[in-house]
Image (tube, helix red, strand yellow):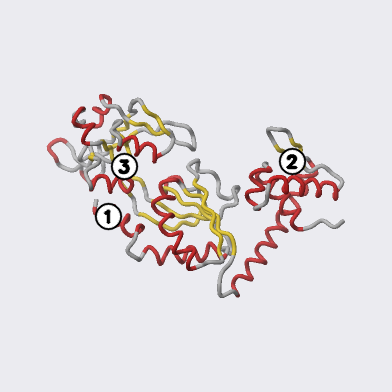
Amino acid sequence: MGVQLAELTAFVAVAENLSFTKAAVQVGVALPTMSQTIRSLEERLGVRLFNRTTRSVALTEAGDRLLLEIQPIIAGIDHALESVNLFRDNPVGMLRLAVSRPAATRVVAPIIQPFLAEYPAIRLEVSVDDTHSDIVSGRFDAGIRVGHRVERDMTILRLMDEFRMLAVATPDYLARHPAPPAPKDLHFHNCIRYRQPWDGSIQPWVFRTLRVAGGQAPKGGASRHPAEISVEGSLIANDIELVMSAALDGVGVAYLAEPLVGPYLADGRLVALLQGWCSTLPGIFLYYPSRHQIPMPLLVFLRFIEKWRKRPGLLHHATETVKRA
């Protein structure tokens, strides 16, 4: 029948993405080439594998059956080729990472050049993704995001310790609007709100304090005064970088992670509000599906990260900044 492996690989890519455009990007070919490859495969097999409209792509019954049969075979070929990497002096292959935007700019960006310099045969693709999509269905090797958003049943590597969330504003804004003495007083301020890209909800601002009346800590050190504030304001954005930019421009009060605003607190461009009140998030993690054989590009990246964390640099600095807070 003369069916080629490239055609089957293209078929699996379209079937898993249900998109010719995404499949073409994943495989690394032009969209017309991907469409022609699938048409050629259907002609060779004598059946239609996909139902196509201008808005959607869906598997036919024949396509669904072929996908079920061919996926284990393609996976087996991938594993076989990957095993050859064990005998190479210079690891080769594609490493695909799904990374949240703040982690992309402050954790991943500084290590791209040294990693690729050390492993020049590896091709690195970084997809900045704040929607927290499933890395398995997206065919990513690993993801990097805040710990409480990591999917279950993943192997994890901590990149940054837990960090505080702080309410911040510029000195100019505070000159026009006196700082709030307690979280509830944020209702009198213009607050820059963040709409979470993964579910569309507006992020509430959560504050906790260890202090009680008289200034003493509650027994056992546990917080007895959590406050979840639904703030109001003239700006809503679904991008953290835009929220921070607006805060730096004096638009209003923003609720941001300390590692993001730390440099601006240090140089006085921003001021931390509500001293004694804060909330913490569990840190930044690299995570990947548990599997018997880790792809060589991911394996060397994990080893590289472990070495990089011990050097003076962004990861070390960010961790130490949180520890001192």
Give the x, y percent position of residue 308: 39, 64
Q: CA distance from mark 1 to mark 3?
A: 14 Å
Q: Which labelled disc corresponds to residue 165?
A: 3
Left or right of 5? Residue 98 is left
Quadrant in which residue 257 is drawn: top left
Amino acid beneath label 3? Met
Picture residue at 53% right of the left edge, 62% below the top: 298
Mark 1 or mark 3: whose residue is earlier in sequence: 3
Give the x, y percent position of residue 204: 36, 32
Left or right of 39? Residue 87 is left
Helix, strand or loop at label 3? It is strand
Mark 2 or mark 1: whose residue is earlier in sequence: 2
Helix, strand or loop at label 2? It is strand
- Residue 251's place in the image compared with 211, above or below, is above
Q: Which labelled disc corresponds to residue 52?
A: none
Amino acid beneath label 1? Lys
Question: Disc 2 designates what residue?
Answer: 59
Picture residue at 71% right of the left edge, 56% below the top: 72
Q: Which labelled disc corresponds to residue 323?
A: 1
Quadrant in which residue 319 is drawn: bottom left
Q: Specify few, some or many for label 3: CA neighbours under 10 Å numbering under 14, 14-19, or 20 or more.
A: many
